[in-house]
Image: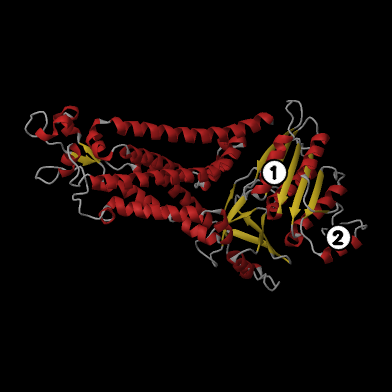
Amino acid sequence: MMGCWILNESLSVILVLSWLGVNLYLFIDTFCWYEEEESFLYTRVILGSTLAWARASAVCLNFNCMLILLPISRNLISFMKGTSTCCRGLWRRQLDKNLKFHKLVAYGIAVNATIHIVAHLCNLQRYHWSQSAEVQGLPATLSKLGNAPNESYLNPIRTFHTNTITELLTTIAGVTGLIISLALVLIMTSSTESIRQVSYELFWYTHHVFIIFFIGLAIHGAGRIVRGQTPESQLLHNVTFCRDHHAQWQKMAQCPMPQFSGKEPSAWKWVLGPVVLYACERIIRFWRFQQEVVITKVVSHPSGVLELHMKKRNFKMAPGQYVLVQCPSISWLEWHPFTLTSAPQEDFFSLHIRVAGDWTEALWKAFGAEGQALKEPWSLPRLAVDGPFGTTLTDVFHYPVSVCIAAGIGVTPFASLLKSIWYKCESQTQLKLSKVYFYWICRDPKAFEWFADLLLSLETLMSERGKAHFLSYHIFLTSWDENQAVHIALHWDENTDVVTGLKQKTFYGRPNWSNEFRQLAYAHPSSSIGVFFCGPKALSKTLQRMCHLYSSADPRGVHFYYNKESF
């Protein structure tokens, strides 16, 4: 298991380093080419090194735009997983994990776009400055080209007495550049975690501005503002000789008037392949949208949670995966992610949807849960389900000891996992996994009463089967009022916990992770322990630090392997 974990982590590191290496190579290679290429020697006389900065960042921008669409095509990856053996095991989990690569590439696009914009603004000012009366010599000669018949221009700014911004916005490059920049700003700002949490709809709709971004990118270079000497002109006009004799052009046979043209746009070549893949992904999603989803059971929990049991043809899942759900009667465009709470062994798949926004509230009302009078099956609204996607929790079964830690709503992915563990134990399946520790840190357990009910049923069933030792769970309540404290104190001696109804008593306050990991290391001195977490980033960093701190330097000692479930 240790070797697999190292290989899995190494693949992620290799992917990131490869991405950085390719970006660096493309930037340096393009930069050096434009600094040395003879066809752009005259262009560099006016623009200097800003030409190379603009072109190098443009190539890196195109490369990252090619990559940005690949992780989006989750349906293609999901489809491959279900039909091809090449995507099983380690590679399958790696594909899910590297969907986070999308975010890293997005930062690459933002950085290169910023460099490209700044470089072109400098280019524009250099073009404008070279038309001033103060400029003499070769820059002045080159800037005046195009005024006489049979001459092609090098400098797109034709006179010094013009507004450069106005001049820019009358070109294809200027208009599309402005559109691309605005689209990128909208996409990046609406993708922040704070906006996604406050208004997922805003993030969802704004993110689709990427269509405008790619259209603008494809035609951005059609204006061909940055120009270089044509190959035919280079054969007649020896640039290394003629640049020192610019005053005698046309008088010397080896120095006829140079001719210039813009470079052919290439951005569309970079993004054509991924756009085709994305189009295929949308076709697959439409096909899945058309597949019938049968709602077999609806449960309204008093804590504002709607439980849905559904069936769909050829639906296969793994613990911890999520699906995208659409309700056409609410919105034809919105797809929302929800973690599956059923086990793969069950003949249905289930979701527990808590009311936490406009869409979930509308769904709650659509199923008649508002007044606790649920609708009949034939009158329920239609749902479309796409997926399942993503999982790291399947690795729980690959360790002899696993520690599952959930904070708040992050408990949802573990519902499927705990059910799956129970089914495997009940069927007497031979498991490498021999012990599971489950930690749940919660502010208000009433918001997740359905999960406490699940733990209660698991506790009862495992006790009946004589496997109560297999699952050790620890629940921590971090918020309570005075009345709750008095009620807890009065009923402390009862056999079951007053908060959850479980035999295991609830702890109050936050866990001391140093003590918890020390006890785990003491109880399993020579084991590989998988730690799985779903919850806030601050706690994630703490747990990751604990895993490093309490892992033994001795290969024969205890080792903690950290896995974070994205939520």
Q: Going by the image, does 314 lie left or right of 442?
A: left
First in sequence: mark 2 vs mark 1: 2
Q: Which residue is mark 1?
A: 542
Q: Which residue is mark 2?
A: 498
The amino acid marked with disc number 2 is Val
Work out which quarter of the rendered image holds the N terminus and state it.
top right
Name the residue: 16% across, 27% down: 241
The amino acid marked with disc number 1 is Thr
> Looking at the picture, how far across and down is residue 305, in whole percent?
69, 63
Name the residue: 73% across, 45% down: 404
Toward the viewer: 324 or 532?
A: 532
| Badge 2: residue crowd in 10 Å (few <14, some 14–19, many ≥20) | some
Q: Nearer the viewer, mark 2 or mark 1?
A: 1
SS state under label 2 = loop
Name the residue: 17% across, 37% down: 137
Task: Work out which residue is located at the far front of the displayed protein and give it.
Answer: 134
> Looking at the picture, how far across and down is residue 31, in whole percent?
35, 34
Count of labels in the image: 2
Reply above or below: 88 against 342: above
| Residue 282 numbered mark, or none | none
> Looking at the picture, how far across and down is residue 259, in whole percent?
16, 38
Residue 508 image-quadrant placement: bottom right
Q: Going by the image, does 446 lie left or right of 212?
A: right
Asked which colour scheme the image uses, the reply is secondary structure
| Badge 1: residue crowd in 10 Å (few <14, some 14–19, many ≥20) | few
Toward the viewer: 419 or 355?
A: 355
Name the residue: 65% across, 64% down: 355
Residue 426 image-quadrant placement: top right
> Looking at the picture, how far across and down is residue 349, in whole percent?
66, 54
